[in-house]
Image (tube, rainbow, N blue to C red):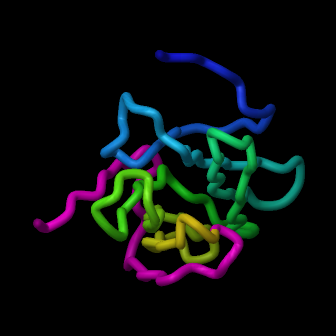
Amino acid sequence: MVREEQLDDQACEFPRVDDRLAGLDAGFGHVTVARTPSSGPVSGALLRYDLRTGAVARHDFGAGQVPAEAAFAPADDRPGGPGWLLSYVYDAARDASDLVILDADNLAAPPVATVRLPRRVPFGFHGNWLADR
């Protein structure tokens, strides 16, 4: 059964689930939020929706930090299980991007890792996680 339902009024884009559950009953969905305040720099966040309970977890990146679409990298072979969210995050102060890795089960925590990149990854760049096995 397929159903469409608005989760909240947050303006967001690039909805994703664990790719192994595409078209199936996924427990969690992830989206990207970019905010353009009336004054000050753009900022962004990643949200994780519990599609069964309606709970929302959030990771704010702060002023001048804008995340792109987040790909889910599973920690094990259980679809919908634990894993990480990987996103390119533009840093306006450096005019460059970072690859930021977050614990998908604890978005409020600091990043698990941040890989500083020497230049900006263009907005609109999309990616997927493919295991090496």
**Residue 125 or residue 32, whichever sits in front:** 32
The residue located at (63%, 71%) in the rendering is 106
The residue located at (65%, 52%) in the rendering is 47
Residue 32, magenta (yes or no): no
Outermost left residue: 133
Q: Is residue 11 left or right of residue 107?
A: right
Residue 126 place in picture, x, y as percent:
36, 47
Residue 82 place in picture, x, y as percent:
46, 66
**Residue 18 or residue 123, whichever sits in front:** 18
Quadrant containing the C terminus in the rendered view:
bottom left
Q: Is residue 54 left or right of residue 114?
A: right
Residue 45 place in picture, x, y as percent:
67, 58
Give the overall secondary structure of the magenta segment.
loop
The residue located at (47%, 55%) in the rendering is 70
The residue stretch that appears in magenta? 107-133
- Total number of numbered labels? 0
Residue 124, magenta (yes or no): yes
